[in-house]
Amino acid sequence: MNLSTLPATLAQLDLRSCLIQRQGKLIFEYYRDQHIPSELAKINSCTKSILSALIGIAIDKGLLSGVSAPLREFFPQLTRDADSRKQHITLEQLLNMSAGFRWTEFGGANSFPKMTRSSHWINYVLEQPLAEEPGVRMEYNSGISQLLSAILVQAAGRSTAEFAEEFLFGPLGIREYEWETDPQGIHTGGYGLKLRPADLLNFGQLYLQEGIWQGVQLLSGSWVKQSVQPAMETEPPRHGGYAWHWWTESMIRRSGSDESVIADYYYARGYAGQFVYVLPALQLVVVLTQDNKRGRNNPPPDVFRDYLSPLLKATSS
């Protein structure tokens, strides 16, 4: 893989960091400034994929019965809700964002900002009406992630961060982090975590190794495999699929009218350009971090698709 021109390209894009690891060996490392490797920075919605891993660990340990568990087990107030469908929403439907709540993350109803301005985020989410039958369609919803964080607290009997420290962060060597909480002290499930680029690389490597880290099975291989399988189709302008708090996509080679899949991959994605890509067929993990907040009408460049993917395609030829 010829990466000699990549540093100049990334500098023009004003990227914070780019790390590429193949077969567990770091083969490319770029930082815009020398302080970035040691600096905690927001990973935004990449937090969702870390929460997915924590839910998987809780299931592995028998703290949660499984992804078919209904919401009423954790929020019995739903048995008094006028819409009885809410109490039957499953953990799996929370994980793949198909719970059916009427929700517009940003714009329109502006559901996410309204949740963060409310005095009780969990109640705010549960009180939203259902727009459709659960399990039918994916609707991106950070409120759902907050429900999952609250469920983990109930199951583990400790905070989401404390659970992460013992069973994920500690083993991965993540000693420092920052994590926001809601008004009730529940750590934010959909965003709000600050980590270093190398921490994200280790997290991606854990998934590439199917849950094994330094010879220890931190997360069951069955959870890793199932949680990154596309479960729901996304809708424009998004592309690809959505799994259990992971995005899924395929690297395509086009020749005239013919298309062939080079590799399927999955990734964590956070606002303003935070990404963790895992490409099992190529034994690659790619971490990208940015601080570009150009807005919806002027999005940052798709660094992976436009600049890294061509290099990877050339390698796989």
Image: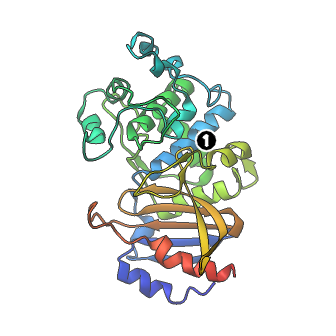
- Tell me which corner region of the image, top left, top right, bottom left or bottom right, holds residue 164: top right
Estimate the x, y position of residue 179 in percent, counting from the top left: 40, 45
Q: What residue type is labelled 1?
A: Phe
Q: Residue furthest front?
A: 257
Q: Provide the residue designation for mark 1.
A: 167
Estimate the x, y position of residue 261 in percent, counting from the top left: 66, 68
- In the rendered image, the quadrant that contains the N terminus is bottom right
Which residue is at 73% across, 43% downward?
222
- In the rendered image, the quadrant that contains the C terminus is bottom right
Q: Which residue lies furthest to the top in this view?
A: 80
Which residue is at 33% across, 65% downward?
291
Residue 165 seen from this side: no
Which residue is at 37% across, 76% downward?
33
Left or right, residue 144 beside residue 252: left
Measured along the vertical axis of the image, is residue 310 above or below residue 289? below
Estimate the x, y position of residue 173 in percent, counting from the top left: 58, 54
